[in-house]
Image (cartoon, rainbow, N blue to C red):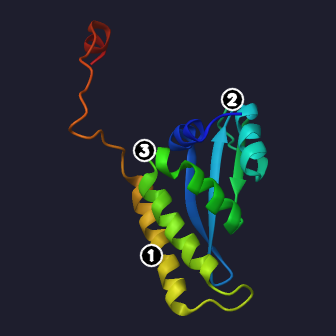
């Protein structure tokens, strides 16, 4: 079975964490899309969740999506990969903050307006982060261009 480090790296490249309006509040969803079905089966075997076909009309290869939407399962998955994620670490922190607050509230009761506002702010921040390109830290050296790469530019 792949390690948490593997899942974090794969999730950084192919996964997403987002919030969806649900019953006058929000639902957190964690998902990974891939053409290679066995990778998604590994997610499912390790973290539970569901796999469904992803219907993108322009694709030549079939796509699949593994996803979680129950709060305890999202918490378990995001906690497992949090330390190893690079690209999506900020998104994971926002999702974990929302999950911890949500799980602290009583079940089956109306959530307070302040928590709904917090969910709205988390959703907004996740959308902003999703649109930002990943930038390489300045302290990390960049490999010099090869002759082939320089001819392509």
Query: Residue drawn 55% across and 38% down?
Result: 5
For residue 17, the mark is none
Query: Do residues under tags 2 and 3 come within 8 Å of each other at their CB atoms?
Result: no
In the picture provided, is 61 more to the left or to the right than 117?
Answer: right
Q: Local crowd at mark 1 within 10 Å, few (<14), some, or many (≥20)?
A: some
Residue at the far top: name it.
147
Foreground tag (1 vs 3): 3
Instruction: Pick whichever, 111 or 22, lies toward us.
Output: 111
In the picture provided, is 41 more to the left or to the right than 84?
Answer: right
Q: Regarding mark 2 in the picture, which secondary structure is present there?
A: loop
Instruction: Pick whichever, 152 or 135, lies toward us.
Output: 135
Query: Residue drawn 46% across and 58% down?
Result: 91
Query: Mark 2 or mark 1: which comes first in sequence?
Result: 2
For residue 86, the mark is 3
Measure the C-alpha gap from mark 2 to mark 1.
Answer: 37 Å
Q: Is residue 127 above or below residue 61?
A: below
Find disc 2 in the rendering and name its residue.
60
Measure the C-alpha gap from mark 1 to mark 3.
Answer: 22 Å
Q: From the image, which quarter does the N terminus lie in?
A: top right
Instruction: Pick whichever, 6 or 56, lies toward us.
Output: 6
Find disc 1 in the rendering and name its residue.
121
Foreground tag (2 vs 3): 3
Pinpoint residue 37: horizontal percent, then vertical percent.
75, 34
In the picture provided, is 26 more to the left or to the right than 40?
Answer: left
Count the marks.
Answer: 3
Query: Residue drawn 71% across and 91% down?
Result: 109
Q: From the image, which quarter does the C terminus lie in?
A: top left
Pinpoint residue 108: horizontal percent, then vertical percent.
75, 87
């Amino acid at each position: 079975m792949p390690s948490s480090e593997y899942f974090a790296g794969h999730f950084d490249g192919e996964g997403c964490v987002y919030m969806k309006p649900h019953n006058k509040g929000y639902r957190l969803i964690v998902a990974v899309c891939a053409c290679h079905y066995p990778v998604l089966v590994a997610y499912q075997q390790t973290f539970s969740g569901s796999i469904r076909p992803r219907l993108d009309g322009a694709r030549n290869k079939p796509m699949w999506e593994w996803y979680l939407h129950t709060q305890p399962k999202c918490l378990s998955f995001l906690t497992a990969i949090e330390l190893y994620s690079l690209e999506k670490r900020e998104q994971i922190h926002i999702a974990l903050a929302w999950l911890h607050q949500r799980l602290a509230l009583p079940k089956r009761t109306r959530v307070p307006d302040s928590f709904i506002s917090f969910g709205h702010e988390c959703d907004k921040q996740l959308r902003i982060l999703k649109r930002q390109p990943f930038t390489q830290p300045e302290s990390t050296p960049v490999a010099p261009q090869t002759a082939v790469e320089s001819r392509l530019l």
